[in-house]
Image: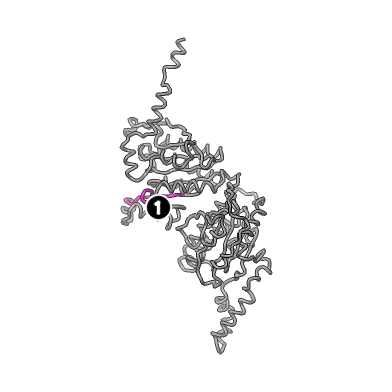
Amino acid sequence: MRLVEQAHTGPGPEELRRLKEAAREGPDPAATRRQHDKGKLTAYERIELLLDEDSFTEIEQLRRHRATGFGMEAKRPHTDGVITGWGTVHGRTVFVYAHDFRIFGGALGEAHAEKIHKLMDMAAAAGAPLVSLNDGAGARIQEGVTALAGYGGIFQRNTRNSGVIPQISVMLGPSAGGSAYSPALTDFVFMVRRTSQMFITGPDVVQAVTGERVTHDGLGGADVHAATSGVAHFVHDDEETCLDDVRYLLSHLPQNNRELPPRLAGGDPADRATPVLADLVPNDPTRAYDMRAVIREIADDGEDFEIHAAWAPNIVCTLVRLDGHVTGIVANQPMAMAGALDIHASEKAARFVQMCDSFSIPLVTLVDVPGFLPGISQEHDGIIRHGAKLLYAYCNATVPRISLILRKAYGGAYIVMDSRSVGADLAFAWPSNEIAVMGAEGAANVIFRRQIAESDDPEATWARLVKEYKQELMHPYYAAERGLVDDVIDPAQTRSVLIRSLAMLRAKHADLPSRKHGNPPL
């Protein structure tokens, strides 16, 4: 009887409930008010917005750090500044961790890191996406090297899980030093204007070392990383719309690399004609148009989800659905740099192609490219190496791949934009296509330079030779006659042709050579 009485002398359910409620409310109501005053939500509020209602299961809520010294033994709040657990998004399991800025400024310590390590391992074992809600001040200085080692464990797991489960980083506060590297290793980075920043060294250090004065936002704010550095894939004005878009992105992704993305059947007929495309794209190869309008005409219900919209605008990378199936589209954008490929566009598209291939998302490439951007800075900054990244990504991809030449496709850029020769499963072209080493005008200047110079009327001779070159080598059916494209199609049939072709390729199986891994031109 005495043993039974002793077994019931510990904390009861009411005490447990009180402890968990206190952990959720944070160490100090004033800390919550300060968070809200900055226009920021608490970690729990963010998780509630991300996940389906009442689906969150928290783990290690009562975890505390074991550090001593520097007053740490007197400050041992539950959760240790990070909330970990899982729930559902659109009914599918998603793992999530969220830094709680109210506790040690969200800084990472040993126990804090161990919670994240455990959650990352659980996500990999369960084969489910991992979302991190980042709002932390970096490594916890009071815990020294053990905090730094905690980051190492996160980086190692980010890398091991890369291409296995989707990893999404949502930046909702400052991220400096080592804490910026984990997001850079993940598949997608979201940022919020005015409240989130990422940098390796902050403005004070920059000024002390280089003398340059810059604000936090000017150095590593959302718009800087969305448009200049390319670190951020998406940028938003507030946390609510940001987290809503995270949910939307997850609806396009599979749970892991062994599954296909979820199909969402809609009411847009697979055989819907697209006659407006002939009007959207001018026959004159020098006239600009918005490639996004072409993509939306092809996509189910005119919807697409563009990635890296503000960075390298001369190429468009976006997710759409075709007959309900998620498809990645890579397309030259004539509205920016005439759609020419440069260093940033090559990197942007290569990363997107690699992501789609990792998660079984078929690829459609819409080609209207005048070539690679010429210039001393491009050459000196390594356009050869960076352009090879896109070439490598396409050649390495085993998902269904279809290319469609809308208008012009010149030089090496034609080859790089998923041509038949680098492994596209199917290549189509519109009747307006021009495939050539270069434009007719430039080609005539090279081939017939002496003939033009010796002519009595150089201008008339040049015009005649340009016309002859076009007729001989650049007419719409030249590539089809030589098997470089599978068919020349009516623009009005573009959507239906793509959908039928993707349906045929859905069971595609392709094996890469046995190897540890390739050596891409990083």
Give the residue drawn at x 51%, y 54%: 305
Q: Which residues are magenta?
A: 189-203
Other-residue count near label 1 (Cα within 10 Å), few / some / many at <14 / 14–19 / ≥20: many
Q: Which residue is mark 1?
A: 222
Q: Is residue 223 above or below residue 144?
A: below
Left or right: 180 in relation to 462: left
- Outermost residue toward the top? 1
Residue 198 in sight in this render:
no
In this view of the protein, which residue sits in the foreground, 69 or 484? Answer: 484
- Of the residues shown, which amino acid type is indicated by label 1? Ala
Residue 264 lies, in percent from the top left, at 58, 48
Q: How far across and down, in percent of the image, does residue 522 sit?
A: 52, 55
Colour setting: one colour
Q: Is residue 49 left or right of residue 75?
A: right
For this rendering, which residue is in front, 190 or 372? Answer: 190
Q: SS of the residue at dot 1?
A: helix
Give residue 493's quadrant in the image. bottom right
Say if 122 sits above or below 399 in the image.
Answer: above
